[in-house]
Image: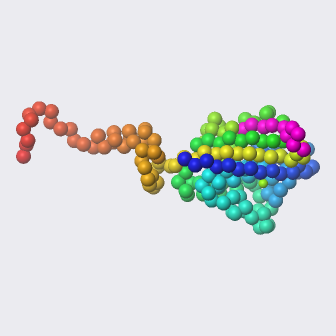
Amino acid sequence: MRIGYGWDSHEFHAGIPLKIGGVQLPHEKGLAGHSDGDVLLHAVTDALLGAIAAGDIGTYFPPSDPKWKGADSVTFLQEAMRQVSRAGYTVANVDSTLILAEPKIGPHAAKIQGRVAELLKVEPAAVGIKAKTPEGMGTDNAAIAHVVVLLVKNSGKGSRPKRAVETVPQPEIDRVVNDLIKEVPEQPKTGGKTRR
Ligand code: MG
């Protein structure tokens, strides 16, 4: 198992679309950034990369590269997922906290949860979406996201777990054992003498 943590912030600017967690939300201001400013997907991306110690979002998508101007942050997350998969892991669950004065996230939380779950290839129940207002922080013109993610080692073909007991789920072991048992021809129950 590996744990990853990601954090990001973006400033609200008038007249641009607001995207959080891959979902466009109705609001008069959006989050400014080199890409689409999706603060939650950026934090998720960093958490994924952090969990496998594979750098951060800027390692793969430097803001200095004009190629990523206005980019859909889903692209960033998908690259992080590719790295996670290459390292032999899948996402177990993710938890997040958004800190922003407005808009209210509650009415959109289920949609954001569903979209993030889809991108991380997990059930919505494996994605925590929480939101708070920035009391006393003086960050009313920004959106902040904190994310933790838990990865588990893959047990499928091609992976070479060092310690099978730790990394192969019991149902998988049961399946393999049952298949082996099926392949063994039935032994005669009577007799007792060795046949030659
Ligand atoms: Mg960012």
- Residue at x 60% of width, y 55% of height: 52
Give the image location of residue 150, x and y in percent.
60, 45
**Magenta residue span:** 129-138
Vertical position of residue 131 compared to residue 52: above or below: above
Toward which corner of the image does residue 102 lie, by quadrant? top right
Q: Please say whether residue 194 is visible from this viewpoint.
A: yes
Q: Is residue 149 magenta?
A: no
| Side of 161 where 126 appears, left or right | right
- Residue at x 85% of width, y 40% of height: 134
- Residue at x 62% of width, y 57% of height: 53
Q: How is the image coloured?
A: rainbow
Q: Please count the marks in the image.
A: 0
Q: Please say whether residue 26 is visible from this viewpoint.
A: no
- Residue at x 44% of width, y 53% of height: 162
Give the image location of residue 128, x and y in percent.
69, 38
Give the image location of residue 163, x and y in percent.
43, 49
Q: Residue furthest front?
A: 136
Vertical position of residue 163 compared to residue 55: above or below: above
Q: Nearer the viewer, residue 37 or 56?
A: 56
| Side of 170 where 108 appears, left or right | right
| Side of 23 where 121 appears, left or right | left
Ligand 1's quadrant is: bottom right
Q: Residue furthest right?
A: 14
- Magenta: predominant secondary structure element? loop
Give the image location of residue 131, x and y in percent.
78, 37
